[in-house]
Image (cartoon, helix red, strand yellow):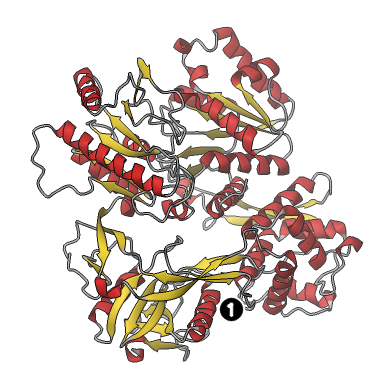
């Protein structure tokens, strides 16, 4: 299974956090982001590098989550030693076990899953594991759900120095290490829907005698529209409506069932499902994309642990829920049914219909800019024939070239540290470092650091208040082999290289082993020295690998066989999202769409400044805000330094005095001239944009704000972070 970039980053951060002190770790991961995929790969990677480890994955009581999670690990990580509580009770714990346990089976005597004597046996298995030299690492899944003092008492028995707590809506502990996966990253990969539309197309005043029927009518109408849209893509997805009832509402349940029956959607014909604590109707195969059920009526049952990607619409008739539970319920309609976006605004959105103002406010607060007001806007007639040539990737297989990666890393290190073919001098230069590059450690011993000192309070226990203490350990290739493997694997995660590729690159650059011959070898280390070098300089090496892939402008010329050129036309319509609470709602008349407002969201500060500039600049005839992912938007192909193809979506297309410009906006320069652009690929993107502009006889560049002068600047030449260079010119003087 190929992991997404954000998933690889999360795995890397988890591995790093496991090495940093003894504080707990919180993984905040949006529903639909593949949390189980990430955690199972993380556990496998960690266990591979750490002997005598046992992972215990604790889940809440509802939904048989422990069984679901175990099945997924068996699917993702072949031949892994996974166990349920029943397996532990039979055979105990062994090295590299991954145990999935429902904690309520251990804490609730009323559960009847374990008798008192069996609970005692469970404690004995833990004690036997400790006596055998095993160490436990604990993951608490859905950590916001009913985790009590009794549950915590169970965790304490494992005597772990780290607890990983996972949830889409975790209870944040400021003393813990927070690893947060942004919804923007999950959306960009197409795993969850781009937008939550709340009460779409509602008039300013809703005059209805029956609010329930009004909401249900809206939902069913939307469901019918989505069915038609899916059919155009030859997809068998049958979008599902979730109707959520208040507790103790049997009368309302009967009302909803009767209304659906009036629409020929009934329990009898299998099109209506009911999932309540004491009632289950027509739930078989409801999770499948082509399931026949059109709607399901719920209360709280599906808030946790239910995975039904075709769920598209939520009708919320419920009142008085806490915010955490509300967000979990919304998560049920956010997954993409086929794990990709369709380039269709209707299908790439999910829908909430409710008259519960508290729920709406809570949802908007939780989902932030992904819960904005929305409307469909249409392209003005005069811009329907505007066209450009867009570039797309033609190669289906991954084009990453290990040889190019090796060459790029070699050149980066040579340039950064002024290295040549003299390995002895290279060692000295790497040990010395530079003003902008880290020093490398050379030793046959493994070096680590810790802290010493005094702290009067917990707040004083920080690296700023304590002294750094280094300690060294004689390297043993057997005992440190796991740590070496762990470090090599994590270096590869930085740029998506396989373990074998990273070992080869590190060997060719630094080891004197015969199988690692390389004409541009930088060091000649013995195997023990090489092991220690990789372990001791893990941070410096992974930074070098990462920056080497982005260093410099575009150097590879893409042939016609690598790039597909297609005509691009501005989409005829767009789902426009905006902040309806903004005090200013003026229409930008120069935008190519009718009804494009100044309150457009989501927008970066640079994008907002540039849009205002375009609207107020007399030289600008019209402008268009491009999308950031999808076949329907304008794109240019570029490659990183390992020849991996990537797509660049410039932010804006505009006309200046009848000539077409293409512009990308980036973070600005602060008042001292320091760059605030966090995109390490900006030089490559700028170079490939200039190549494209010259090829097609167009204009454009990269735009950033200079906070010292409060002016927008444009770079139409080689990219640089030096705001004082001639590459950056005042934008309004160039138009």
393 sits to left or right of 263: right
Mark 1 residue crowding within 10 angstroms, few (<14) / some (14–19) / many (20+): some
The relative height of residue 281 versus residue 387 in the rendered view (above or below) is above
Q: Position of residue 117 (x, y in %)?
A: 59, 8
In the depicted structure, whether residue 286 falls above or below residue 730: above
What residue sits right under mark 1 in the picture?
553
Which quadrant of the rendered structure holds the C terminus?
bottom left
Residue 471 in view here: no
Q: Is residue 525 above or below residue 223?
A: below
**Does residue 67 appear in the picture of this structure?**
yes
Answer left or right for 25 relative to 417.
left
Q: Quadrant of the N terminus?
A: top right
- Tell me what residue is drawn at x 84 percent, y 48 percent: 476
Q: Residue at x 55, y 11 (%)?
A: 114
Tell whether 19 sits left or right of 580.
right
Give the tally of numbered discs.
Answer: 1
Q: 604 or 129, which is in the foreground?
A: 604
Please state which of residues 228 and 214 is positioned toward the viewer in this rendering: 228
Picture quadrant of residue 143: top left
Q: Quadrant of residue 322?
A: top left
Where residue 683 appears, as percent x and y from the top left, is 54, 77
Q: Is residue 292 above or below residue 336?
A: above
Residue at 62% over, 59% down: 396
Toward the viewer: 10 or 227? 227
Q: Would residue 696 be found to the left or right of residue 485 on screen? A: left
Q: Which x, y percent locates residue 35?
A: 52, 41
Residue at 55% from the left image edge and 8% from the top image edge: 115
């Amino acid at each position: 299974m190929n992991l997404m970039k954000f998933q690889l980053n999360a795995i890397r951060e988890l591995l790093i956090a496991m090495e940093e002190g003894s504080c707990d770790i919180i993984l905040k991961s949006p529903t639909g982001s593949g949390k189980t995929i990430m955690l199972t790969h993380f556990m496998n990677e960690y266990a591979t590098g750490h002997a005598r480890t046992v992972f215990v994955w604790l889940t809440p009581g509802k939904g048989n989550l422990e069984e679901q999670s175990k099945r997924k690990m068996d699917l993702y990580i072949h031949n892994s030693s996974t166990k349920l509580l029943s397996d532990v009770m039979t055979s105990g714990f062994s090295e590299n076990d991954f145990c999935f346990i429902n904690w309520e089976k251990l804490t609730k005597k009323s559960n009847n899953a374990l008798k008192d004597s069996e609970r005692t046996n469970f404690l004995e298995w833990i004690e036997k594991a400790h006596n055998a030299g095993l160490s436990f690492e604990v993951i608490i899944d859905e950590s916001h759900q009913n985790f009590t003092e009794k549950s915590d008492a169970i965790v304490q028995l494992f005597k772990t120095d780290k607890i990983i707590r996972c949830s889409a809506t975790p209870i944040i502990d400021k003393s813990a290490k927070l690893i947060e996966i942004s919804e923007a990253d999950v959306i960009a990969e197409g795993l969850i829907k781009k937008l939550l539309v709340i009460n779409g197309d509602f008039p300013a005043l809703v005059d209805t005698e029956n609010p329930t029927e009004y909401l249900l009518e809206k939902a069913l109408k939307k469901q019918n529209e989505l069915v038609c849209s899916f059919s155009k893509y030859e997809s068998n997805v049958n979008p599902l409506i979730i109707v959520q009832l208040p507790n103790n509402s049997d009368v309302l349940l009967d009302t909803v069932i009767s209304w659906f029956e009036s629409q020929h959607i009934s329990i009898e014909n299998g099109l209506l499902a009911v999932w309540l604590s004491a009632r289950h109707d027509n739930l078989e195969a409801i999770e499948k994309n082509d399931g026949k059920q059109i709607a399901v009526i719920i209360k709280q049952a599906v808030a946790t642990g239910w995975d039904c990607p075709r769920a598209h619409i939520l009708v919320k008739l419920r009142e008085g829920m806490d915010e955490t539970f509300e967000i979990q319920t919304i998560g049920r309609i956010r997954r993409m049914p086929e794990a990709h976006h369709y380039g269709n605004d209707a299908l790439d959105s999910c829908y909430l219909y409710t008259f519960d103002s508290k729920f709406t406010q809570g949802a908007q607060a939780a989902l932030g800019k992904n819960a904005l007001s929305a409307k469909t806007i249409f392209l003005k007639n005069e811009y329907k024939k505007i066209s450009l040539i867009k570039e797309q990737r033609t190669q289906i297989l991954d084009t990453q070239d290990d040889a190019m990666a090796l060459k790029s890393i070699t050149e980066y290190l040579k340039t950064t540290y002024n290295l040549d073919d003299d390995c002895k001098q290279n060692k000295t230069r790497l040990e010395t470092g530079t003003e902008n590059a880290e020093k490398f450690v050379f030793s046959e011993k493994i070096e680590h650091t810790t802290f010493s000192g005094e702290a009067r309070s917990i707040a004083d226990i920080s690296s700023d208040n304590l002294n750094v203490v280094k300690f060294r350990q004689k390297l043993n290739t057997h005992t440190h082999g796991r740590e070496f493997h762990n470090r090599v694997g994590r270096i590869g995660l930085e740029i998506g290289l396989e373990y074998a590729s990273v070992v080869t690159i590190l060997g060719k650059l630094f080891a004197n082993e015969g199988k690692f011959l390389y004409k541009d070898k930088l060091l000649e280390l013995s195997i023990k020295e090489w092991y220690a070098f990789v372990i001791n300089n893990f941070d410096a090496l992974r930074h070098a690998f990462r920056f080497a892939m982005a260093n410099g402008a575009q150097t590879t010329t893409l042939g016609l066989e690598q790039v597909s050129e297609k005509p691009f036309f501005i989409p005829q319509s767009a789902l426009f999202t905006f902040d309806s609470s903004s005090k200013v709602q003026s229409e930008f008349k120069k935008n190519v769409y009718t009804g494009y407002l100044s309150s457009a969201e989501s927008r970066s500060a640079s994008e907002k400044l540039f849009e205002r500039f375009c609207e107020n600049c007399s030289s600008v005839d019209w402008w268009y805000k491009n999308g950031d992912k999808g076949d329907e938007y304008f794109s240019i192909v570029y490659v990183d330094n390992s020849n991996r193809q990537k797509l660049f979506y410039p932010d804006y297309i505009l006309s200046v005095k009848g000539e077409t410009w293409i512009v990308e906006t980036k973070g600005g320069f602060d008042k001292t001239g320091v760059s605030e652009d966090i995109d390490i690929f900006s030089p490559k993107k700028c170079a490939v944009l200039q190549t494209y502009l010259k090829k097609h006889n167009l204009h454009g560049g990269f735009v950033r704000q200079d906070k010292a002068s409060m002016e927008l600047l444009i770079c139409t030449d080689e990219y640089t972070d030096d705001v004082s260079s001639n590459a950056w010119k005042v934008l309004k003087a160039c138009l």
